[in-house]
Image: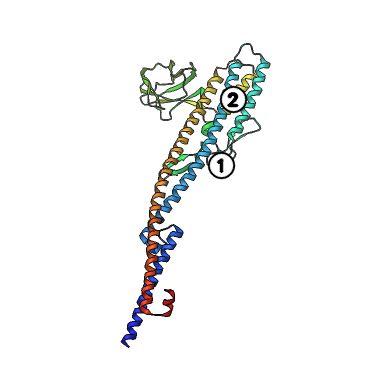
Amino acid sequence: MNARISSHHVFNQGSKELMNQQTSLDHTHKQLSTGKQRVNPSDDPAGSAWSLSLKQTLQITDQFQDNGKIAQNRLDLEDSTLQGVINVLQRARELAVQGANDTYNADDRAIISTEVRQLIQEVLGLANTQDSNGSFLFSGFQGNVKPFTQNGDGEFQYHGDQGQRLVQIGPERQVASSDSGHEVFMRIASATDFRVNAELGNTGGGEILSGKITDPEEYQPDHFSVIFSSPNTFDVVNNMNGHTALENQTYTSGEAIKFNGMEITIQDVGAAPVAGDQFTVRATNQSLFATLEDFSLAMDANDPSMANSLADIDRVLDNITETVTRVGARMNSVENEREVNDSYKFQIQTTLSDVDDVDYLEAITRLNEQMMGLKAAQQAFVKVSGLSLFNYLN
């Protein structure tokens, strides 16, 4: 009985060794066929978890890259659209210069008016530009809403909102992929008009008498405050940059206060202003469409006074050009972030390759060693067991 147990034990041990050798060989074969170190997650749980984390990071980075491409396409479209608007405005400016020519008559100016109205329709079409998905470029968050229309009275209306779509292009980086049509085309500070208001909290008797632009070339459509430090003295502060335009000036009721190419007049009504009283001076807003419409009407009226129209067209041009500059900066930002993402993606892929991919040279060497080991184990087992099957295998 002891001999039979010993033979059985030898047979089992030999079979087990052969199975282990074959399993190792199969595992190496699978590594070589898949190109991966781990045939099953259980082969290396820690490595599998790390690999999964890297793949998730890679997917997120790919999404950032896709977002960046979407943002780039929309910004490219906005840039080209606004360049078209600038071309229209430059043509309108040329026409305004022509309209001021003393040799032009009413018929000449009527022809200019007709072209200006065509330019207005051209801008309207550009302002209603849609991207490749049919989303309106300048409608804010309401991409399915046509932003600009002209009603029966010829007035232009904006139907979008003031939202600015943000796109996530990096882990901590967002970029605006659009601009609100309200900011681009509607809310443009007039170069020829402003309003003056007394603050509601004033307790003195000062009241606005008049205000006008005296030097269009010097005038800048900013936001100022006239602040009284006493009934007899005041400062003028530019609220846009915090600079003091006039300091410790003497106040005389009914005498013009001149600054920034304009003048305003404050007078006492029952009493003088008191310390702390303020008066705001703010440029009015005028849309691009209204600016061109006013120009056209001036031509219809055979009015050669083009100073106001030229000033307002220049202001509109400035606003569009500033928007183009901001769009260009965002385009650069997207491009830079995509380059960063590409570099980061390469690093992730390199690390993932180190974690996942098999070393072919090492695996082939190991495969040869395992094949030799299996053959040697088979031969040894045949000799030990003396079974006919193993003799056949030998």
Neighbourhood count class around disc 2 (C-alpha, 10 Å): few under 14, some 14–19, many 20 upward = many
- Identify whether 86 is placed above or below 63: above
Callout 1: helix, strand or loop?
loop
Identified by mark 1, the residue type is Gly
The residue positioned 39% from the left and 56% from the top of the image is 361
Task: Say left or right for 4 vs 315.
Answer: left
* Residue mark closest to the camera, 2 vs 1: 1
Identified by mark 2, the residue type is Leu
Q: Identify the image quadrant of residue 244.
A: top left
Rendered-image quadrant of the N terminus: bottom left
Residue 11, percent from left and from top: 36, 79
Rendered-image quadrant of the C terminus: bottom left
Q: CA distance from mark 2 to mark 1?
A: 26 Å
Residue 93: assigned label: none
Task: Say left or right for 69 vs 150.
Answer: left
Which residue is labeled 1 in the image?
A: 143
Which residue is labeled 2 in the image?
A: 292
Question: Looking at the image, which is closer to me, 354 or 134?
Answer: 354
Callout 2: helix, strand or loop?
helix
Residue 289, percent from left and from top: 58, 28
Question: Looking at the image, which is closer to me, 226 or 324?
Answer: 324
Question: Looking at the image, which is closer to me, 245 or 209?
Answer: 245
Q: Identify the image quadrant of residue 228.
A: top left
Which residue is outermost to the left? Answer: 2
Residue 234, percent from left and from top: 37, 21
Which residue is outermost to the top? Answer: 103
Residue 9 seen in the current view? yes
